[in-house]
Amino acid sequence: MTLRGIIGPGPHKHAALALLVAGLAVVAAALVLSGLDLGAQALRLCLQISVAVTVCALFAAYLFIGRISEDRRQITDSEQRFRRAMEDSAIGIAIVGLDGRILQTNPAFAAMLGYSREEIEALTFFQLTHPDDVQIGSETMAGLKAGTVDAFHFEKRYLKKDGTPVWAHLAGSVIRDEKSGRPLYLVSQIEDIDARKQAEARITEAETRWNFALAGAGQGVWDFDMRKGGTTYSSAWVKMLGYGDGELDGDPDRWLTMIHPDDCATVAEADRAHLAGETEFFEAEFRMRHKDGHWIWILDRGKAIERDAGGQLVRAIGSLMDITRRKQAEERLIVSAAMLADEKERLRVTLQSIGDAVICTDAANRVTFMNPVAEKLTGVSSDDALGKTLSHVYWAVDEETGHRIGMTRPVTGEETRSDQNSRAVLIRRDDTRCSIRQVVSPILNERTEFCGLVIVFQDFTDARALQRQLAHAAAHDALTGLANRSSFIRAMEGMVDQARKDGTAAGGRHQFMFIDLDHFKLVNDTGGHAAGDALLKRVADAVRGVLGPEDIVARLGGDEFAVILKSASTTGARIAARSIIDAITGLNFTWDGRPHGIGASIGLTAIRANCGEVDEIIARADTACYAAKAAGRGCVSVAPDGKVSDDDRSEPLKPFAAAS
């Protein structure tokens, strides 16, 4: 170890070196002087001085070295105390570089965030800080670097290893270089305050709910405290009576002067009973004068919470609520109660006389009321029905599925609503049926408890039949009874979509025919439209008679018809088309004694996955039909669609004549 290392750092080191150098210089000077021609006396004096200086230098060096050793020992002790305090501290401590890197930390901080010390010392404070709080303390850090701030403290959130945020209070100071004052690093103390923050949040939330509940309920709070010399009232209390904040504070007896004279005795008795311990609370309903002079009804509830040694009241707290509307409602109820019996009787008479059938049940589903219309529709008399279960009287099923329509009771807490059904069928005891429209409504009491059902129903047989007729008319041709153009197009669109989904590109899954009557115009011209209509009906029956029940036949308009053959090949479609032409040609139609003969030309195309839209299919078949007419009428033409199946190879595109 060098001399410089022994002496140690700092100003002591430089001073010791200076003394040693001076001593050596004196010795060197003595040696030089001994070589000079000086007198013995002078030489002796120089040697004595040099020896003294050298001894002093060595002694001073010894003292300085001792001082340095003591300083080192103290520093070591200080470091050990700091390290021990850091290790044993219950509060997190971290030494942080100016770039945010964690240079050293203690177990408390690592445990607080769920890391090991090695893991946390590999991170930065920015990585540990909640993203929303990264900017907190940035101004303090800027001040530390600028030398204007030496200490800091603030609150922010850190992220635990599992990602959970935790609130902490951060306090610390900057360690600077002794000479330059340049900041070296930060020493921070981090205290876990998450529990306190959560408690504060719960308290704030509770206070918010309390204040909101009081404000929402329209309640005002009063606080009588003899130590403070009077009564204070909340803002809601004074506003209830039309006053401003603080306007009624002070005199504890002022509110008594505002009570209606007729209610003073009631209030005084309630006050006496509570102060005497006869009641747990002071509670009274009375009228108080509003600032503008009118009277409002008040519900006042309070409690004595503190008495002195002599039992005298010291403090009481209570609340006031404006119950004017409730009192007015009670007065109206008194009036209504007198009318209730008459109203009930009028209701009974009304239900007896209305045109709708009405059945009422209780919570156990037993019949409690049944009007004459219900008796007539169900075939059960009221005397026989009362007290019986609903199924004994009323059995309704769904018109389409045949399943019984259950009378469900509402689930507690759910919004109650009526259940309407316009396709119900009432099955009577004699197995006769009646189409009905029913509305089932639950009955709930004031506690929202289920008390029963009200079933209102009407005979809907005629209306249901009319609906079916209208639905049929909307989808069928009025003259022929076949499917009309719109319903046929809808059915065809469904088949085209299904063909695309199935991907049946080769060999059409369905076949489409476009049928145009030949020489039909002559029938209209000679026999009139009545003859034409009659002939169209005959044609519809003929086409329908040739095809199977699953095939679809429609009249597109005028003398144009369309057919969809389900699951047919082109060969099978040609045979069916030939049969249709033969059936139409073979019609023996006579009008006013005059026979009329007609024929038909048919265009045929397949419905495949790649056949295009419905309009394209119809247009392709229409074009093929024109080709059939051009070929001499009374024949079938297959539309060229670019796809030839095995059964098309003999005659893929050529029409063939009726005679062939």
Image (spheres, rainbow, N blue to C red):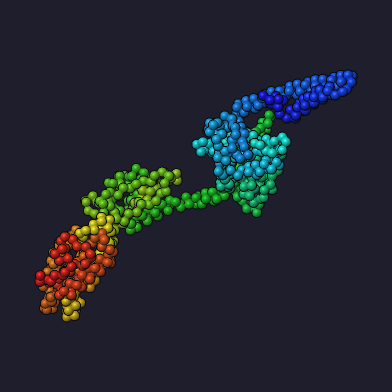
Residue plotted at (53% across, 36% down) = 160
Give x and y (percent) for residue 228: 71, 38
**Quarter of the rendering containing residue 456:** bottom left
- Residue sitting nearer the eye, 65 or 174: 65
Residue plotted at (25% across, 56% down) = 503
- Residue sitting nearer the eye, 589 or 509: 509
Residue plotted at (77% across, 26% down) = 21
- Note whether residue 615 is visible: yes
Give x and y (percent) for residue 551: 19, 61
Residue lying furthest bottom in this view?
Answer: 526
- 209 above or below 589? above
- Residue sitting nearer the eye, 209 or 9: 9
**Quarter of the rendering containing residue 568:** bottom left
**Quarter of the rendering containing residue 564:** bottom left
Give x and y (percent) for residue 206: 57, 40
Residue plotted at (71% across, 23% down) = 69
Please tell me how many numbered marks the rendered image carries: 0
As drawn, is 97 to the left or to the right of 373? right
Q: Quadrant of the C terminus?
A: bottom left
Give x and y (percent) for residue 89: 61, 28
